[in-house]
Image (cartoon, rainbow, N blue to C red):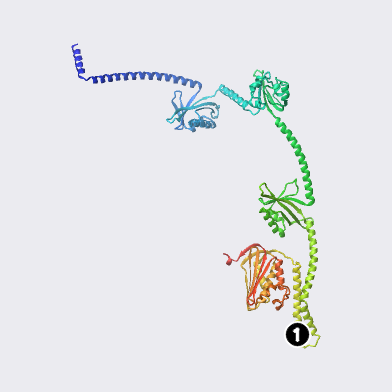
Amino acid sequence: MCTSFLHQAIYASTLSAVPAFVQAVIVVAITLVFAMLFYNWLYKRTRRNESAYLRMSNSRLALILQSCGISVWVYDVEKRKYCKLTFDGEIESEYISLDFSRFFDLDDFEQLRMAIFDIRDRKKESQVMFVHTPEREGEKQQLIEIKLSVLTTDKNGKPSAILGMQRPVTDERKKQFREQSNIIQYQSVFNSSLIDMTFYDEEGMLADINSQACLNFHVESGKQLIDGGCSIHDTVGFNVDLNMKEPVQCTCIIDLDQLADEGRRGKGVRLGGKIYYEVIIYPLRYDTGEPLGLFMEGRNITEMVDSFHRQQETMRQLEKATNDLKTSIDNMNMALKVAECRLTNYYPDKHELAIITDLNKPQHILSQVRMLDTIDTEDRLNARRLLTQMDRKLPKSIDARLKTVFEDHSGSKMYLTFNSVPMYDSHGAITHYSGLCRNDTKLINTELELKTETQKAQEAELLKNVFLLNMSYEIRTPLSSVLGFAKMFESEHNPEDEAVFVDEIKKNSNKLLRLVNDVLYISRIDAKMIEVKHQPVDFASLFDGFCHMGWSNNLKTELKTIVENPYEHLEIVIDQEITGRIIEELTRNAVKFTHTGTVRAKYEYRSGELNITVEDTGMGIKNEDLPHLFDRFSHNRETEFGNTGLHMAIIKGLIELLDGKIDIISAPDKGTTVWVTIPCELINMDLKKDLQI
C-alpha cells in the first residue's frame, strides 16, 4: 500500500507538474481513440449484418431468376462486349458481337443491336422485345423475351452499361401474348377501319359501333345510338336470322326517310334519303356453340352505284359516239380511196413522215433517208429543200408535186402532190405539218402529153420561123456568090480564071453549109430541143482532152498553149457533151484569133459551180464590138475569119441551157479572157499532191 500510495503520490506530483492545457489535450486524444475503436467495431458489425442480408437477398433473387428461367447479361458500351453473369452476379464469360450473335437468330439479333443502340443514344430508356434462338438440327427454336434497361451511367449521364434480362416464353405466355395482341389488333382495326363495323348481341341489338360507321350515318355519338336501342333489322332494312350459321353478304337499298316515318331509324341518325348499303354479317358463337352475337361489316356504296349508273349512261353515249365516229372514218376512208389521197404528218423533231392510208390501220413511218429514196433523182433536190424548210419549222404551208421512183399499173412514174400546213401547240410552237398526199399521176401524164404535143407543135413552128428568119439574113450572100461564079463559066472568060471561079464556089459553098448547120443548131437551142443529161463524170480526166480538141486544128508554131488542171480527181454531176463542146469552141476561138503568145485554159470548183477560164494574148476585141458580141449575124471579127456570125450566140445558148453564165473582158491587141460558170453537184474532190497544203 505504501508503494501504491507512493506511486499515486509520484503520479499526482507529476500531473501537478504538467500544464493544464496539455492535460486537456491528452484527455481529448484518449477519448477520440476510444470513440474510433468503438465506431470501427460498430461498422464491422453492421457490414457483417448487411453482407449476410445481401447474400440472403442475392440467394433469394438467384433462386427467383433460376426458377423463372431468367438469365442476365450486360452490354459494356465502352468495350463493346457482352458479359454473361451468373446467378451470384459474377461475370461468367465475355463475348464480342459476332460470338454473342450465335445465341440468336441473325435477323432478330440485328434488331436487338438496334434496340441497344437506341438505349445507348438515350432515344429510349428501356425496351421489351421478342427474339428467336437460331435454328439448329435436333433443337427446337425458342422464343425469348428480352428486357433492356440502363444499368450504370458515366459522369456525363450517358449509359455505360446496359442490362439485359431474358427468359424463354412459355406456351402460356405465348397464349397470353397472342390474346393481348389479338385484342389490340381487334381494337385497332375496329376503331381505325375505313369501313363501317358494328357488333350486335344475341338479341340483335347494337352493342358496339366504330367511328367510321358513326361518320357515315351522321351520328354524333355511338353511345347515343346504342342507348337508343337500334336493332340490326332497322340497320339493314330487313329481318335478319339471328341464328344464322354461315356469313351472309348482300346489298340492300335502305330508305332512311321511310324508316324515320315508321319510327325504326336509330336515334341520333341524321342521314336521310335512299342509300345503297353493302354488308357482310358474321355469326359469332361461344365455344359451347351458343350464339354470342352478330358482327357486321358495311359500307355505303350509294356514290359507287350512282357512279356506275353514270358510267353506264356515259358508255351508251360513248358507244353511240364511237359508232358515229366509225361511220365518219369509213366515209373518210372511202373518200381517200376514191380520190387516191393519203393523210400525212411530218414531225420535224423526229425527221419522220407518217402516212395514213386507212384510219383504221396503223400509220406507216418513213425516215428522211427513206423518203428521199422514194423520190426520183430530178426532184430530189426540191424534196430536200422542202424537208429542210419543215425541219427549220418555218411557218409556211407546203405545196409541192414530186416525181417518185414508183410506177403505176401502166409503167409510168408516179407523181405525188403534197399539201401540208403547220400545226401549233398551246405555246404557239410548230409541232408538226399535217396535210394530204394525192396521186396525180394520171393528171400529170395527161398534162405532160398535152404539153409535149403542144411543145412539138410550137417547136416545129418556131424552128421553121427561126430557120427562115436566119436564112433570110445570111444565106443569100454565099448563094449569090456560088450562082455568080457558076454563071461566069457560061460567059466569055479566060480559062486561067476557072481555077479562081472553082475556089470561090467551094469557099462560098462551105460557108453556106456551115451557115445552114449553125442555123439548124441554134434553132434547136431556141426550140429547146437539145436534151440536157446530167451524170457523174471525172472532169479532171476530161478537161485536157476538151482543150486539145479545140485548138489542135488551128494551132500555130509561134503559139504556146497551157492547160492548168489542179485536181487529181474532180467527180461532179454535169452534162459532159454540152460542157465539152463549150470548152472546145472557146479554145478554138482563142487560138484562131491569137497568132503569137499564149493561150491558157484552166478551171476550178467553187461552192457548187464549175468555173472555166480561157485566156489569150491575141488581137482582142474593140470596146464598141463587145456589147454586140453575142448578137446573131453581127458583122464583127467572126466574119473576118470565115465564121457565120452565129458562133458566139451558139456558145451562149449552150451555157444558158446549163443554167450557167458567161463573161468576157478584152482589149485590142492585149488579148481576151472568157469566164464561164456552170452549176454542178460535187461528189468527190482530190487535189494534186503538189497543191495540197
Three-letter code, disc 1: Ala
Would residue 411 be seen by someone viewing this image from the given angle?
A: no
Q: Nearer the viewer, residue 85 or 242?
A: 242
Spot occupied by residue 121 in the image (x, y as percentages of width and height)? 48, 32
Question: Based on the displayed image, in which of its 4 quarters is residue 400 positioned?
Answer: bottom right
Direction top: furthest residue: 1
Quadrant in which the C terminus appears: bottom right
Quadrant containing the N terminus in the rendered view: top left
Whether residue 150 is visible here, answered yes or no, is yes
Return the residue nearer the eye: 388 or 74. Answer: 388
Vertical comparison of 457 with 644: above or below: above
**In this rendering, would 535 be left or right of 160?**
right
Residue that carries the numbered disc 1 in the rendered image: 499
> Quick one: 87 or 445, which is closer to the camera?
445
Residue 443 location in percent, x, y? 79, 57
Q: Position of residue 133 (x, y in %)?
A: 53, 28
Residue located at (68% from left, 73% from top)? 626
Q: Is residue 104 above or below residue 40?
A: below
Q: Residues within 10 Å of mark 1 (few under 14, many from 20)?
A: few
Q: Quadrant of residue 682?
A: bottom right
SS type, badge 1: helix
Find residue 563 and report its horizontal and vertical position in percent: 63, 71
Q: Nearer the viewer, residue 79 or 503?
A: 503
